[in-house]
Amino acid sequence: MTPLDIVREAAFAAVDRKAARPILMDLRGVSDLADYQFVCSGDNERHTRAIAEAIEERCRTIGGVKPVATEGKQTGNWVLLDYGPAVIHVFYNYLRDYYALESLWPRAKFVNLASLGIEGVPPPAAVEPPSGADS
């Protein structure tokens, strides 16, 4: 699976589990961290863990891939699934607002999930970078 395939399957799984505010950022040429970063959130710790588990299951079943590293599943506040060039964050809502990852890469391109065949998700809104933010 390509990095884009991984985040597309992650988005399908997250939307299926009713994840809130799913966004996909194209970080190619902007960050050495990853090519793509998918961010979504859940209503509580149980919800975030269920979303993360659904993402892992779909990526393993559809593409035969497992994350290189996983962090935060025990608490469910912020689950990180690291697939190398594709990084997935599943946040508890209040923590997502606090950390505001979407604003850390002001030059990142936001990918419209509908263009990947994921229906029912509004296009990403413009995100204002914090003052003094660098890419």
Image: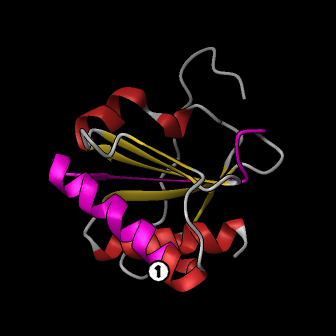
Give percent across and percent down for residue 45: 18, 46
| Residue at screen point 69% across, 76% down | 1
Start and end of the magenta stretch? 32-59
Q: Which residue is mark 1?
A: 118
Q: Is residue 114 visible?
A: yes
Q: Is residue 41 magenta?
A: yes
Task: Report the amino acid beneath label 1.
Answer: Ile
Examine the rendered structure and indicate whether residue 116 appears above or below residue 77: below
Examine the rendered structure and indicate whether residue 51 appears above or below residue 15: above
Instruction: Report the front residue among 16 and 128.
Output: 16
| Residue at screen point 69% across, 65% down | 3
Q: Along the horizontal axis of the image, is 48 left or right of 96? A: left
Give percent across and percent down for residue 71: 43, 41
Give percent across and percent down for residue 114: 51, 78
Res 120 quadrant in image: bottom left
Give percent across and percent down for residue 78: 35, 40
